[in-house]
């Protein structure tokens, strides 16, 4: 073979560089992490299936039985997961065909709101674990306005949404001001405030003003004038539109505003921010107030939609903790957080259908989520599994080679 021309060599080098960039991109790492999580889930589904366990005892005598049982168990479970999260392949009408996707969107709304809030905290250098408490306080104020106030249609909904934001923001202000004025660790403070919020909710539900009746700790239902309108007769409502608007607002705040620039700089290097004349302490307060307000909005999907519409002891569910994984998976960026929220919403929506259709424990979904986050947090592990190039290791290798060359020339 003849030697490559300079143009061919240059083209080949560009192609290799492009392939290396794709292989080491964040999107590729996330996709491969999901693939690994699905493989781990498949192993657990197979292990939990009675047919697979019985056929493995004579796998060498009749391997077809084992692989048939394996395909039935794993294929059936993941097929049900898909049909419960994306499309119903046996619909009675177009609404039924899109109902799973609508449920995925509905489940994703509180995760997106809370994930956006926690993501701002992460980028501001604060590890906010208080999403749960902030959702509860947002729900308390939103729910009270919803069932106790009597306002016109439209205005009532707006005031409820603002109440949810204000409630979460007030609960976020506490750890923010403590961090700014006393240096208190926000992780410890927010964890404690989660417990305080839970007990505060339980106490409020013992008050006559917050009880639908004296026998149950459940508030009256939110008035019809304060509920989100639904689209096309599906589970998708105005809350999803607000969540997307919040994502756009967070993008503008972090990428285009002066406050966002201060938040990013303080998060990356507080000392440099102070040297530049920025008030890092007040920035921490703003970070927690905004983060708490966004987390508080997550309660609107429970109270103003068709999910609960009443305050109860489980109004926040596990959204505050699930949002931590959503923010981490989305790299604390608005678009990534929206996509991560939709992914986790789909896993939750599909998980219920998978359990009812195949008997597969829904706990498998928690394992999938945990494995995805684990791999996202450990990129070298994903690169090692798929033998992907590691630019950092390559740079270190080149640096060592250059250092050896310099030493040899110095000795010579």
Image (tube, rainbow, N blue to C red):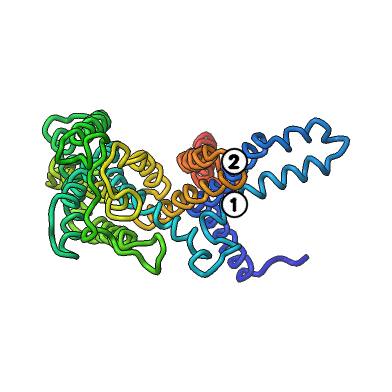
Question: What residue appears at the point 53 percent right and 69 percent down from the top-left corner?
Answer: 93
Residue annotated with mark 1: 80
Question: What residue appears at the point 78 percent right and 35 percent down from the top-left corner?
Answer: 55
CA separation, marks 1 and 2?
A: 10 Å
Element class at badge 2: loop
Question: What residue appears at the point 19 percent right and 31 percent down from the top-left corner?
Answer: 203
Instruction: Decide if residue 323 is in sight here.
Output: yes
Q: Quadrant of the N terminus?
A: bottom right
Residue annotated with mark 2: 360
Instruction: Decide if residue 396 is in sight here.
Output: no
Q: Earlier in the sequence, mark 1 or mark 2?
A: 1
Depth check: 165 or 178 in front? Answer: 165
Name of the residue lying farthest toward the right: 61
Q: Residue 253 location, x and y as percent?
A: 23, 57
Neighbour class for label 1 at 10 Å: few (<14), some, many (≥20)? many
Q: Quadrant of the C terminus?
A: top right
Q: Is residue 382 above or below residue 84?
A: above
């Amino acid at each position: 073979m003849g030697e490559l021309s300079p143009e061919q060599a240059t083209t080949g080098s560009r192609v290799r560089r492009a392939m290396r960039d794709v292989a080491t991109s964040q999107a590729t790492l996330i996709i491969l992490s999901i693939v690994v999580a699905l493989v781990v889930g498949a192993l657990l589904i197979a292990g939990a299936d009675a047919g697979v366990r019985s056929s493995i005892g004579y796998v060498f005598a009749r391997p077809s039985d084992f692989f048939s049982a394996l395909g039935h168990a794993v294929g059936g479970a993941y097929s049900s997961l898909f049909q419960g999260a994306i499309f119903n392949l046996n619909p009675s009408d177009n609404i039924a065909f899109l109902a799973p996707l609508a449920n995925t969107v509905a489940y994703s709304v509180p995760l997106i709101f809370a994930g956006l809030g926690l993501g701002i905290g992460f980028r501001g250098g604060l590890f906010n674990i208080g999403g749960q408490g902030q959702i509860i306080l947002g729900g308390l104020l939103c729910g009270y306005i919803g069932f106790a106030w009597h306002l016109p249609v439209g205005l009532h909904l707006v005031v409820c949404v603002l109440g949810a934001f204000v409630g979460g923001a007030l609960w976020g202000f506490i750890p923010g001001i403590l961090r700014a004025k006393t240096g208190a660790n926000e992780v410890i403070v927010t964890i404690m405030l989660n417990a305080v919020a839970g007990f505060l909710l339980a106490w409020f539900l013992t008050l006559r003003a917050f009880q639908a009746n004296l026998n149950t700790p459940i508030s009256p239902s939110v008035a019809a004038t304060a509920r989100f309108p639904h689209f096309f007769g599906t589970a998708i409502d105005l809350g999803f539109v607000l969540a997307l608007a919040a994502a756009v607002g967070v993008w503008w705040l972090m990428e285009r505003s002066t406050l966002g620039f201060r938040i990013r700089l303080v998060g990356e290097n507080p000392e440099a921010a102070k040297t530049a004349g920025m008030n890092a302490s007040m920035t921490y307060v703003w970070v927690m107030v905004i983060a708490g307000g966004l987390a508080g909005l997550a309660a609107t999907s429970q109270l103003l939609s068709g999910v609960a519409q009443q305050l109860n002891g489980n109004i926040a569910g596990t959204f505050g903790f699930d949002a931590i994984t959503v923010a981490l998976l989305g790299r604390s960026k608005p678009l990534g957080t929206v996509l991560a929220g939709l992914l986790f919403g789909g896993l939750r929506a599909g998980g219920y259908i998978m359990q009812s259709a195949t008997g597969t424990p829904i706990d498998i979904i928690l394992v999938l989520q945990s494995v995805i986050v684990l791999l996202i947090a450990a990129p070298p592990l994903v690169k090692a599994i798929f033998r992907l190039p590691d630019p950092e290791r390559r740079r270190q290798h080149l640096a060592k080679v250059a250092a050896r060359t310099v030493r040899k020339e110095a000795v010579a």
